[in-house]
Amino acid sequence: MITPDRSQSAARRMLAKLMKPLVTLFGCLALFIPMPMLLAATVEYDLTIAWQEMNFTGRMVKALTVNGQLPGPPLRFTQGDHAVIRVHNQLDEETSIHWHGILLPNAMDGVPFVTFPPIAPGKTFIYEFDLRQSGTYWYHSHTMLQEQRGLYGALVIAPKDGNAFDRLRDHVVVLSDWTDEDAGSVLHTLKRGSEWYSLQKGSGQSVLGAARLGMLDAYFSRELQRMPPMDLADVYYDRFLLNGAQQQSLAAQPGEKIRLRVIAGSATTFFYVQFAGGPLQIIAADGQPVQPFTEQRLLIGVAETYDVIITMPADGSFEFRATAHDGSGQASLWLGTGPRHNAADIPYPNLYSSMSGLSLKRVLALTPGGSMGMSGTEVRAGKFDQPGMNGMDGMKEMEHGAMPQDAGEMNLAGMASAPEMKHAGHDIAGVAHENMSSDKALNGHPGLGMPTHEQPAAPGSIWLRLLAEDVSSKAPLAADGMSPERPWPPYDKLRAVQPTAFDPDKPVREIRMTLDGDMERYVWFLNNKPLSAADHIEIKRGEVVRFIMINRTMMHHPMHLHGHFFRVLNAQDEYSPLKHTVDVAPMTTTVIEFAAEEFGDWFFHCHLLYHMESGMARLVHYHDFTPDAATAAVRQHLYHDPFHLYGRVDLMSPMAHGAVVYANTRHIFSAEWQVGWQRVDDLHWEVTPAYDYYLNRFASVFAGIDLEGAGNHVEKHEGIFGLRYLLPLNIASRAWVDTAGEFQFAVSKHLELTPRLAVFSEAEYDTGERWEIRAGATCLLAKHFSLIGQWHSRFGWGGGLRWQF
């Protein structure tokens, strides 16, 4: 038995008397503190970013890891938690982490030069914010091209008060794309205009391929409108990964319902997801709950998230498959045990199908927007402000010129016949079509319900050899977005669980923007301006901001707004869904609106990584917001527009010819040269260094010097001033006048007979020297090398090797 210490008991009583009023005081103060702050838990993570050797393809390459993992570890919280995340940079370069879709203080958003200076090598940055929401989200680097190398992971926030779905077992599925090639090298390849990735993916397009499918009319219609070959993805990937692997297994019981939290953490790849055991029940999009509906096949855009419920059948192992949008690969999650049941294969996209109509007005248009049927004048007049497809008057030419009978009466020209819908108290023309049955709709983008196109068998081995890398070698084929087997995202089916409409009395700021680009030079714009040359988008607190996004390209663009959720105006009217990322499909308009309540500077950009890096981005700036001094000091780096060096050398028996280019978005420094020694008395040479100012995909103006001579003798040195312009049929033209008053005009054309074999010709007329003509063919051997043979009017026949760098 222990005898209590009386002196200590007396001291405790005295301390209790002194503490009583303090306790009372703090109790009163607590009445004025919100309950969530009293109950919030602090959840802490340490994330270490480092290089690590990894093997996805059979060889070891450097990858970016978080805590030694790729993808990084999933971060789990509960709504209301206080997050403290320490990011340790063990790289030899800057880094960052952005919390995609999370509402947080501006300084914690993690975008270098926008919200904070990047995390320097060897340094630690502490992110600290309260979790105001619940749902499925993710995190990734926002520094250079680090996301492509593996710096991403899942972030899951459980609701404080869950429902029946929240009580299900859940499993995170992070989808991504992987290339062993350095990401900087990928961007360089895109910038220099190479068809190499298309060949690797088997998505090449050519005259013989179009003829094989009976679609020469579609091929040359595209050429007439000066459009580049269509593709659904820019990059060839060695692997597609699901939680860092091509195949993953998960134990599951017959009849069990499982919630899959699907995250498209890819750099450039959209994925079709489907389950061999039955339909997907979609219950949330971008972390926000939606009224449940089912889909057999779901296209998920880059940076989007979907929560889907699957129900396990009675027996067996069933595949949850993620297929790259362009059909170039897949990754799988196998659920359950027993005999394996594969998900259905998806038809390959028929890239020969043109999505825009052909008319004389488009053929003769002076601007790229005009050739796409959406000229700047018409855009500014508001002609394409309504959600839905644009410029679709030529859809009858798709799929061998035949439309299915049940789609024949649809009015597709500008959606002029669509009934009006009211969104957020504002009249917006809708996208519903009375003549279109729901099973033929494009799940958010009205379409045709085109049938699958069965590609005919190859008539002989010569076709297999010549067209093995052509779209026509795939079977079956289906028009993307036009066939029920290749749907676009199901945006029109997304219905919020509660009304999302804003007070109709709130002021509305409407901002119209076109999504533009040039695949040949790989530059991407908003309103024909890259980030480096654009002003910020200024908004004010308290207003509703509406973005009208008009896609004038043949690419999908998943547009992401940091720090906000926006309403995607769709057929659900006041129940339009809330999202943070939305796909603006080719040749369509998408309208979003959001409440300007998150004070700060926020990034808005296309989430295709190489599009963002090539200019398709803007800064959204709240009026009267001032960034902190450290961020303001580095802000100019956001608008950096780097130069890229590339070129080619043709070394042939009678002559050599080449060009070197050093260019950023608008400024192009180049030097074209040729040296000939066959059929001439002395070595004949010509060099033309020039500076071009890029206007748009069709035109640039230039100035330079034309130097020409024989041996060591300079025979001509004149200043030149001119214009380059792209003519119909993708014929490149060039005209200049020199300081001696001489005029020169040249045209050239490149045409792919097969994905590897191309023919070319060039004719040049000079008032001083008359005609110079060359014509030939190239055969692509590898990424950097081709065989070349040509006839030159001065130097004769010859052949050799082309090197592209």
Image (cartoon, rainbow, N blue to C red):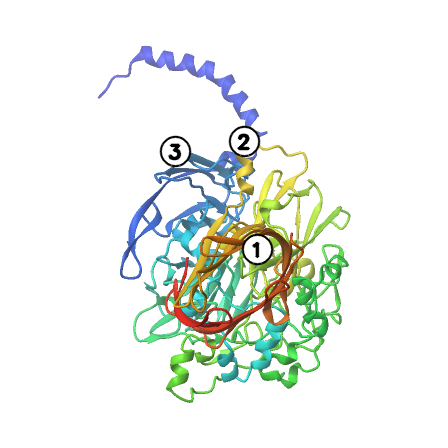
The residue that mark 3 highlights is 123
The residue that mark 2 highlights is 633
Residue shown at 75%/55% (left/top)? Answer: 425
Residue placed most toward the observer, 715 or 261: 715
Compared to 301, does 101 lie above or below?
above
Mark 2 residue crowding within 10 angstroms, few (<14) / some (14–19) / many (20+)? few
Q: Residue furthest left?
A: 1
Q: Position of residue 77 (x, y in %)?
A: 44, 45
Q: Visible in this render: residue 607?
A: no
Quadrant in which residue 570 is drawn: bottom right
Residue shown at 74%/48% (left/top)? Answer: 508
Residue shown at 72%/69% (left/top)? Answer: 414
The Cα–Cα distance between marks 1 and 2, rounded to whole angstroms, is: 27 Å
Label 3 SS: loop
- Is residue 643 toward the left or the right of residue 387 in the image? left
- Amino acid bearing label 2: Ala
Residue placed most toward the observer, 672 or 474: 672
Label 2 SS: helix
Residue placed most toward the observer, 380 or 548: 380
Q: Position of residue 206 (x, y in %)?
A: 50, 76
Q: Position of residue 470 (x, y in %)?
A: 45, 76
In the picture, which quadrant includes the N terminus? top left
Q: Visible in this render: residue 306?
A: yes
The residue that mark 1 highlights is 524
Mark earlier in primary sequence (1, 2): 1
- Amino acid bearing label 3: Lys
